[in-house]
Image (cartoon, grey):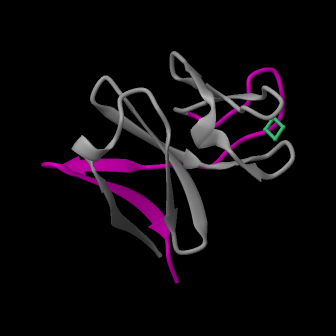
């Protein structure tokens, strides 16, 4: 079952810099860009390293700091490859940021 979980306050998120958060066993990277928040899995599919929150943003794409694979924050798809990171629906209510995760 999917449920929205409060994950941060919008004012706690730095603009255009990744923030690492953990929800139970899931590791996420949040990015606030022009007031909109994107949530993706923090683990890069290339070598399964939890590093995407430290990556470099270019528009709405994040480049993994390890070996440079680049993913869309909107779709999770890797540019020029077949990899894909998880993307999570995000809802902002007032000051609070919620992310939809699967729970049992
Ligand atoms: S682990 Fe991300 S590009 Fe290699």
Comparing 73 with 7, the one in front is 7
Q: Is residue 11 above or below residue 77?
A: below
In x, y percent, where is residue 54? 61, 37
What is the span of residues highlighted in magenta in the rendered image? 75-104
**Which residue lies at the image location 68% right of the left edge and 33% below the top edge?**
77
Instruction: Say how many tags the image has.
Output: 0
Residue drawn at x 81%, y 52% is 48
Q: Residue at x 51, y 22 (%)?
A: 60
Q: Please, which residue is most extreme toward the right here?
A: 47
Q: Nearer the viewer, residue 88 or 33?
A: 33
Decide which of 14, 48 is in the foreground and name it: 14
Q: Position of residue 37 (x, y in %)?
A: 37, 38
Instruction: Let me know if residue 77 is in the magenta part.
Output: yes
In the rendered view, does 30 fall on the left or right side of 58? left
Q: Is residue 99 magenta?
A: yes
Q: Residue at x 35, y 66 (%)?
A: 5
Q: Residue furthest top?
A: 59
Q: Which quadrant would residue 100 be assigned to in this image?
A: bottom left
Where ligand 1 lies, by quadrant? top right
Where is 22 relative to 72, above or below? below
Position of 9 compared to 18: left or right? Answer: left
Q: Position of residue 51 (x, y in %)?
A: 68, 45
- The residue sitting at the bottom extreme is 104
Residue 41 coordinates in the image, percent (x, y): 61, 51
């Amino acid at each position: 079952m999917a449920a929205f979980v409060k994950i941060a306050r919008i004012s706690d998120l730095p603009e255009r810099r990744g923030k690492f958060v953990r929800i139970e066993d899931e590791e996420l990277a949040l990015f606030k860009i022009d007031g909109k928040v994107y949530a993706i899995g923090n683990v890069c599919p290339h070598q399964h390293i939890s590093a995407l929150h430290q990556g470099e943003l270019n528009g709405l794409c994040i480049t993994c700091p390890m070996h440079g694979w680049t993913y869309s924050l909107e779709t999770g798809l890797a540019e020029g490859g077949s990899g894909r990171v998880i993307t999570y629906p995000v809802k902002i209510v007032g000051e609070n940021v919620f992310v939809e995760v699967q729970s049992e």
